[in-house]
Amino acid sequence: MSQRLASTLLAVTLGLLASAASAADYGTPDTSAVAVANNSDLIIELGAGVSTQPAYEGAKDYIVSGFPIVSLQYLNLPGLFEIGSREETNGGFKLAPSFRFIDKRNAADYPELRGTRALDETYQVGLRAGYEFPIYETFNAEIYGEARYAFGEADGFVGNAGVDFISRPTKAWELKLGPTTSFADSNYMSTYFSVTPIESLASFGRLSAYEADGGFKTVGVRGSARYEFRPNWFINANAAYERMVGDAKDSPIVKVGSEDQFFAGIGLSHRFSLDLF
């Protein structure tokens, strides 16, 4: 698949959001009338979506895959700790799970990688923490960071950090846009960006031997739009552009692929309130 796949999914995403906006003209749902039960011990948002992303780290081709939506608003463990707030707030400290999936990479599927060894899937699991503060009326900002442990084909630690500028023009809409960066340790970077001497020989010298070290991996910008079309039901759309930097950019894997990485996705989620104790 080419980058046209990313453009197509992004266009579909924008079209769906435009339809939602058009529907909102005929009556935005009164979300202020929805009250969260005061005795809830867990308020969590769960859902799933579909996205397009590079076929592998540094690829010029794209794949379509599913992704989970998991967001923790409030958790109360009596006598231990309390995280978040029972009432939905637009500020303060926020904590949520963080996931990412990297699909397998096989040189048989990508001629530009001929000579490299096959890589299995990698799973990343961790946490996202952020702090949101007001700037002006309906305009806020959030500083956030994500740390995940990678396991499967690649072992190591990876993460993201950035700033989101947030606008909530109505109770139903939330728009975010801001710069972001990603980084990884040497074990992870070596798995996806290094080329061993044997692999270089197997590629007949087309891929030079290379050893990638840890550090910053990408810089870019991310945006998202979120619409509550029914009480506690949400449409979530996102798009991002990232550019490889540092040792990732200098990798022969990226040089035969692309330094420019695009992402786009859309999903549906529902917020649950549970009384656990």
Image: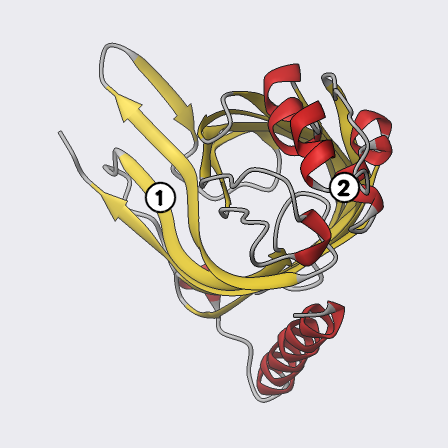
The amino acid pointed to by label 2 is Phe
- Say which element carries label 2: loop
Q: State the colouring used for the structure image.
A: secondary structure
Q: Which quadrant of the structure image shows residue 83?
A: top left
Which residue is denoted by mark 2 in the rendering?
204
The amino acid pointed to by label 1 is Ile
Nearest the viewer among 50 and 245 is 245
- Tell me if residue 23 comes above or below residue 247 in the rendering: below
- Tell me if residue 266 comes above or below residue 114 in the rendering: below
Residue 247: x %, y % from top left: 81, 25
- Tell me if residue 174 comes above or below residue 73 in the rendering: below
Residue 124: x %, y % from top left: 47, 33
Quadrant of image for the C terminus? top left
Q: In this view, does 119 lie to the left or right of 251?
A: left
Q: Residue at x 49, y 61 (%)?
A: 65
Question: Residue 44's mark?
Answer: 1
Q: Alpha-carbon neighbours of circle 2 within 10 Å: few (<14), some, or many (≥20)?
A: few
Q: Residue at x 67, y 73 (%)?
A: 5
Work out how far the residue at label 2 is from the one at label 1, CA to CA, in angstroms. 52 Å
Q: In this view, does 112 lie to the left or right of 172?
A: right
Quadrant of image for the N terminus? bottom right
